[in-house]
Amino acid sequence: MAVSLGGGNGRRGSRSSRYGRPMSEINVTPFVDVMLVLLIVFMVTAPLLTVGVAVDLPQTRARSLGDDREPLAVTIDKDGQVFLQNTLIAEEELVPKLEAISGNGYNQRIFVRGDRTVGYGKVMEVMGLLNAAGFTRIGLVTDSLRPPPQQ
């Protein structure tokens, strides 16, 4: 007692049953290709996004601070010029620009980056401007000190 449930001429997977209904499988090859291209693009561009004003930061053993919001960066280069993020700015314009950016939210974190060759007084002068304007979350940025090589 044999029963054929395949339909058609009795062959399993006949042409009419294969192409008569929609295919339920997703072709992921184009998706994977696009994702790999995007991965390569982001890997190439990510280091370029962190480029800022070139300063030679002093080194310390302090641990880095963790914060979920990106801070504003005020940089003082070796010539004593002040930069807000990557833009050269006059000292008189620093506080009004920061107030405009932060929307009078004085809780904004500001990182001060000073070149190691800049005098202590210049860095403190900029920090004093920020503090006098009401910004209280000011941090100094340094490079981490590398331990001596083990021999």
Image (cartoon, rainbow, N blue to C red):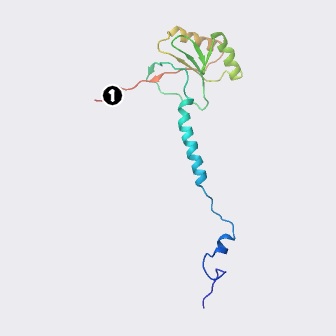
In the displayed orientation, state which residue is furthest to the front: 15
Residue 100 quadrant: top right
Q: Residue at x 56, y 38 (%)?
A: 42
Q: Residue at x 60, y 32 (%)?
A: 68
| Closer to the camera in the image, 143 or 133 | 143
Q: Is residue 111 left or right of residue 92?
A: left
Residue 15 percent across, percent down from the top left: 64, 74
- Which residue, given by chain and number where applicable, does mark 1 sit on? 149
At label 1, the amino acid type is Pro
| Closer to the camera in the image, 76 or 137 | 76
Asked if 19 appears above or below 9 in the picture, the reply is: above
Asked if 133 appears above or below 105 in the picture, the reply is: above
Q: Is residue 81 visible?
A: yes
Residue 17 percent across, percent down from the top left: 66, 74
Q: Is residue 133 visible?
A: no
| Closer to the camera in the image, 87 or 125 | 87
Q: Quadrant of the N terminus?
A: bottom right
Disc 1 crowd rating (10 Å Cα; few below 14, some 14-19, many 20+) is few
Residue 82 percent across, percent down from the top left: 58, 14
Residue 123 quadrant: top right
Q: Quadrant of the C terminus?
A: top left
Residue 45 quadrant: top right
Q: Residue at x 44, y 21 (%)?
A: 60
In the displayed orientation, state which residue is furthest to the bottom: 1
Residue 7 percent across, percent down from the top left: 66, 81
